[in-house]
Amino acid sequence: MTKESKTDPNSDPLVIIVDDDEGVREGLRDLLGSAHIETLVFESTASLLSAALPDRPGCLVLDVRLPGLSGLELQVKMTEMGSEVPIIFMTGHGDVPMSVKAMKAGALDFLTKPFRDQDMIDAVENAISRDRARRLLGEGLSEIKALAGTLTPRETEVMAEVVKGLLNKQIAFNLGISEITVKIHRGNVMRKMRATSVADLVRKTEAIKI
Amino acid sequence: MTKESKTDPNSDPLVIIVDDDEGVREGLRDLLGSAHIETLVFESTASLLSAALPDRPGCLVLDVRLPGLSGLELQVKMTEMGSEVPIIFMTGHGDVPMSVKAMKAGALDFLTKPFRDQDMIDAVENAISRDRARRLLGEGLSEIKALAGTLTPRETEVMAEVVKGLLNKQIAFNLGISEITVKIHRGNVMRKMRATSVADLVRKTEAIKI
DNA sequence: GGGGACCCCATACCCACGTATAGTGTCGCC
DNA sequence: GGCGACACTATACGTGGGTATGGGGTCCCC
């Protein structure tokens, strides 16, 4: 164990449930509890949004129809805020266009009440494993981004030219500086990016480019 | 224009429609025709499967409920056969679980009859542009794969080591040959892969690795 | 049997890369 | 004013990469 990140993808999952029916909330809490999955329940999207949420792997289980901001509207809002938490919808009175809209917007599943317990557990476990994978990837990316953040502006420029596969003399010409200076910057880039080779550097920059 | 590929992503799109109701078929043909989109209609999945289809950018517009192999079953079959043609479903009696299943299986849209003309046109145009993008990407990949196919076994091994960022002497040690020979192979690899630099080679191999 | 692949190795030369050493200069901030 | 970060330059040396030239060998197939 070399990591102690705040958002460790390996920490225990937490599933957040939002439903205005207390029976459903308790039922889900019990169901997921029986699968050893910790839950946090809310009765409205407003109370969810105003709460301080721990950053742990997991997913959102949302009723579509909720007082105030609906589940579908919350999904849109979350996306706009840049959240990528997997969302599982459930509904008692869903229609096809609604479910299609939710799925196109990136929902992971859309269950109609009453659903089979196992279906919900499957959906949640799938969502959790996806969120874990997403966080793992994101962790790697932020590490690289952090390294790239330590570069000076000039070093960043040089790095861009290096990963294009240009020669030092070409880089020097493009930036209007001497080849010697390029070499210095290039050395700094490799050291700061902890790259062991140009191939390594290319992969690192490709990862954060997309 | 330097290309004359058989599956040119820029050729005119073709939308394939499968519905057992002739009225629907003709209606769709007219609708898409009015949007200047060429169509090919089938009344069953069986007749679609037995037909020789031109390989052109486009999509599949499927009724869910069809005699014989249903639309949903066809989707599964297509996926198993490795097809990645975008699929748009339409149905008169669809339920939520059915639509969710189709969307999770990769359907691009799921329209309920009667749908608004514009919704279908939007869905089809979206599907076509996606298929174009997919083909464009695939074209690039097969080009690179073709280049990689011209490599001898040894050259392939050397390329793998090169993109790891290893030095020639390390590669020589790993393969149990002399550094000189590595250089020869390496030169051949760069030439055959039409790579102008190691950075270029890394990107090409990364593209076909995934 | 000869030609064509594939694979191997060596010498030699040139260019590119990397780094150390040593210096110039600007800017902004304590 | 001085210190630190940043950028720029030069000389010099050692290492790595690329290619040409000129060999060696095996295997397979026509």
Image (cartoon, coloured by chain):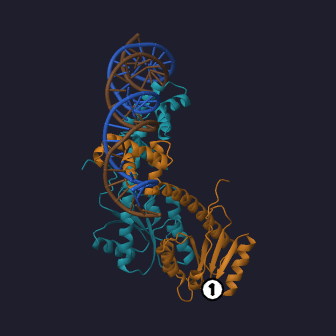
Chain colours: A orange, B cyan, C brown, D blue
B13 with respect to A143 (left or right): left
Residue B21 drawn at (x, y percent): 42, 74
- Quick check: can you spot residue A167? no
Badge 1 sits on which subunit?
A
The residue furthest right is: A34
The x and y percentages for residue A98 are 50, 80
Image coords of residue B135 (percent x, y): 38, 55
Residue A167, compared with residue A156, is above or below; it is above
- D3 or B84: which is nearer to us? D3
Q: Residue at x 65, y 61 (%)?
A: A10
The residue shown at (28%, 44%) is A173
- Comparing B193 with B16, the one in front is B193
Q: Residue C3's image quarter?
A: top left
Single out the residue that lies furthest toward the bottom. A67
Q: Residue flagged by tag 1: what amino acid is it?
A: Glu
- B171 over A182 or under it: above or below: above
A171 left or right, relative to B64:
left
Does residue B57 appear left or right of residue B64 in this picture?
left
Question: Where does residue B67 sit, x and y in percent of width and height?
Answer: 50, 69
Q: Nearer the viewer, residue B115 or B182?
A: B182
Q: Residue A3's quadrant in the figure?
A: bottom right
Q: Residues within 10 Å of mark 1 (few under 14, many from 20)?
A: some
Residue designated by label 1: A43
Q: Residue at x 61, y 71 (%)?
A: A59
Would residue B135 be seen by someone viewing this image from the given angle?
Answer: yes
Picture quadrant where residue A24 is located: bottom right
> What residue sits 46% from the left and 57% below the top?
A149
Q: Classify mark 1: helix, strand or loop.
A: loop
- Tell which of B196 and C11 is nearer to you: C11
Count of picture labels: 1
